[in-house]
Image (cartoon, rainbow, N blue to C red):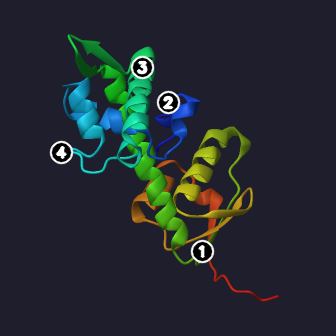
Amino acid sequence: MFCFNGRAALLPRSWYNCNVSSVDDVLTILFSYSAGYKRLRQLARGGSTFPQIGRFSSLDEKKSDSSLRSTLCRLRKNGLAKKQGGVWFITPKGADVHKKRQVVRKRAEFMKLNRKKKKTMIVAFDVPEHKRGLRDWLREELLFLGFEPIQKSVWFGPGPLLEKFVRELDARELLPCIKFFRAMEDELV
């Protein structure tokens, strides 16, 4: 579903960065299975299961080891990973953060693809103040769908809108507050 408002709020502000990082790499490995440091290092450098994963594969051996150690230390400090008997495990909190970061990353990739689409629609809305939460949700979803604001309540983006999104607008009783216009981006001046 399109409603994402609330899931992202569960993540700390520092986790919103959607770039692949060493934390993502280690969480991805630990999410699949637990391993000792030596095996983690091997996998992080592009072992057979995780070919050329993220940052570690591009670092030289010394930097890679120190980066992996500091990443594991940060994960343990934040309660995302734990070490028992020389084997690293992902914690339930770590698994939850990993899943949420994957959702955020996929959402960012989808937004990037939508922004490249040809813009052919203007959406103008006048949502009453008592429905402020829905108005904020609408802006977030329009941004997700590749729209750009012309003004706070006038947005320009790719059309036609997804049927699922229109049904969601209807379910939230927002359709009467919205006007849709066909448009074309052209340099007139």
Cα gap from disc 4 to disc 3, whole angstroms: 23 Å
Secondary structure, mark 1, is strand
**Local crowd size for mark 1, using a 10 Å CA cut-off: few (<14), some (14–19), many (≥20):** many
| Of pointers 1 and 3, the one earlier in the residue sequence | 3
Residue 11: give its label.
2
Residue 121: give its label.
1
| Of pointers 3 and 2, the one earlier in the residue sequence | 2
Cα gap from disc 1 to disc 2, whole angstroms: 33 Å
- Does any portion of residue 100 appear in the rendered image? no
| Of pointers 4 and 2, the one earlier in the residue sequence | 2
Residue 73: give its label.
3
Residue 49: give its label.
4
| Residues at marks 1 and 2 touching, judged by CB atoms closer than 8 Å | no
Mark 1 or 4, closer to the camera:
4
Residue 7 or 86: which is nearer the viewer?
A: 86
Q: Residue furthest top?
A: 85
Residue 151 or 58: which is nearer the viewer?
A: 58
Secondary structure, mark 2, is loop
The kind of residue tagged 3 is Cys
